[in-house]
Amino acid sequence: MKTVTSSQMRELDRITIESGIPGEALMERAGTGAGEFILEFLSSLHASHARRFVMLAGKGNNGGDAYVVARFLSRKTSIPVKIFSTCGIDELSGDAKANAEKLPGGISFEACGELKPSDFSDGDIIIDGLLGTGISGPLRKPFGQWIGTVNSLGNPVISLDIPSGLNGDNGSIADAAVKADLTITIGMPKTGLFVGQGPATCGRLRLVDIGIPGRFIEKISSDINSIFESDVRKFLGRIDMNSHKGSRGHVFVLGGSWKYGGAPFLAGEAALRSGSGLVTVAVPESLPPARHMLSLIVRKIPDKGSGFFSADPFPLVSKLISASDSAVVGPGISDESSVRDLVQLLSAVEKPIVFDADALNIISKNPEIIVKRIYPSVLTPHPKEMKRLLKGFGLEKLINAERLAQATALADKTHSTVVLKGHRTIVAARGRKPYVNSSGSPALATAGSGDVLSGMIASFIAQGISSFEASMCAVFIHGLAGEEGSFGIRGLTADDLPGIIPGTMKRISPFA
């Protein structure tokens, strides 16, 4: 999905209204859609953390969206709604005034010049409708004081369209910006949510479709794209009723060592849960038995008791990969010299391969492994692995550059799909605009989460999706699974993730 600047969004609103859709109808759709996402967010909280909605409304259309949300929440829940506005209703105009005048009597409204911590209580959910994308330059009064007060509290914060104070074009912050836990962006994603300080400011992301005609969107230009649910749904379509395990895709996972015995099984389980009909996991034969799904096919590769792979069994490994539709190489594999020799030989294997973990560190020291490959490759580095790869491929000057620039440059250099993991994971490939993922949670900052992702990417490739689009699909579902786990942010482990994947896909598609 394209991302837009603030001025592009205003232009889209304008031409949509001129095409015959009233501005008040667009605002109603925006507020109603945002309200539905707020109810979804509410379902993830303990009741003690949701005792009152406190709306912060500015003078413009962002405040108008807040009034629609307030009306929606008062109708859909029994939770009290309080509105603090920077001005009286008589000072509003247009659609914002029309919606303020529709507020039911049960909603408390107060216009004030200063917001105090004492105005809030434990259990308040704060909804930010102060500025939206209308900010340019330093904050005017009273917005700086209001934003400072919100950020000083320990309450959940939801921003409408964009956190107030954040520049929608470049993600910069002039004075201060609301620190949101959830941002519900309206109409189209704003570029500032994905660059600069946007990713650190907006929290989780959701998008409300307000019905802007596609013919208008097609005419705008965009430097980057973003991945939302609508971008992934098409890859989770109906499965043929005549399917069998052999037609659903076969994934081969090569990984494990005496240091890290569980990693390849996390990748394998994730591949199965993502829809593959067959998954084979190959590990060194001297490893002790590991707990895993009984439906995984496990092959023990001769290792002469070392606990590491070597080049000796390459014919066997090559045969196993050739019998599959895609492969994952690297989870828990270590970077011993014997392992390096095997990974180098794999460069000639004529199957799509997802390279992860220590396989990436081996590649950073032996770039020819990727340079020689003809079949599709996917590289899935986390930030430290990315630094090593940039050095290995002569791109040291980009080590401190923006993540988008890093991923794009490495994809061009290696002719591979690059999945640069981290908050707002980036998917890049030569000749294509990069995509930035909108889903995700700090819950995914846990050992083994990346192994799960590599298995998911390989699974979607095995099911017939291109490497680039499979990576897009996997990173979004992986991120959303991290948001939806019942263990919260601190309690989720990578072991939990494969079991969450099916429910996450069912949320996206009726055919999952």
Image (spheres, rainbow, N blue to C red):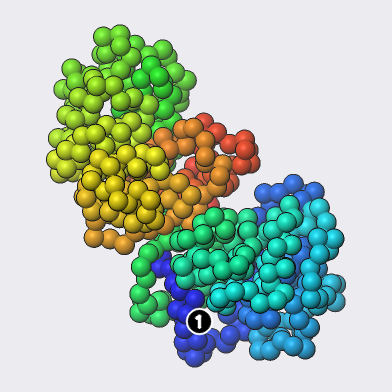
Where residue 492 appears, x then y in whole percent? Answer: 58, 36
Residue at 14% from the left image edge and 40% from the top image edge: 372
Rendered position, 272 above or below 310:
below
- Front residue (pair 187, 110): 110
- Residue 282: x and y in percent read 31, 23
| Callout 1 amino acid | Arg
The picture places residue 315, in percent across and down from the top left corner, at 16, 22
Quadrant the N terminus occupies? bottom left
Mark 1 nearby-residue class (10 Å; few <14, some 14–19, many ≥20): some
In the picture, measured across the screen, residue 365 lies left or right of residue 1, that is left
Tell me if residue 505 can be seen.
Answer: no
Q: Residue at x 37, y 26 (%)?
A: 332
The residue sitting at 38% across, 47% down in the picture is 420
Asked which secondary structure carries label 1, the reply is: helix
The residue tagged 1 is: 10
375 or 436, nearer to the observer: 436
- Residue 394: % across, % down: 23, 46
Q: Is residue 10 visible?
A: yes
Left or right, 299 with respect to 110, comes to left
Q: Quadrant of residue 378?
A: top left
At horizontal 78% and vertical 57% (from top left) the residue drawn is 124
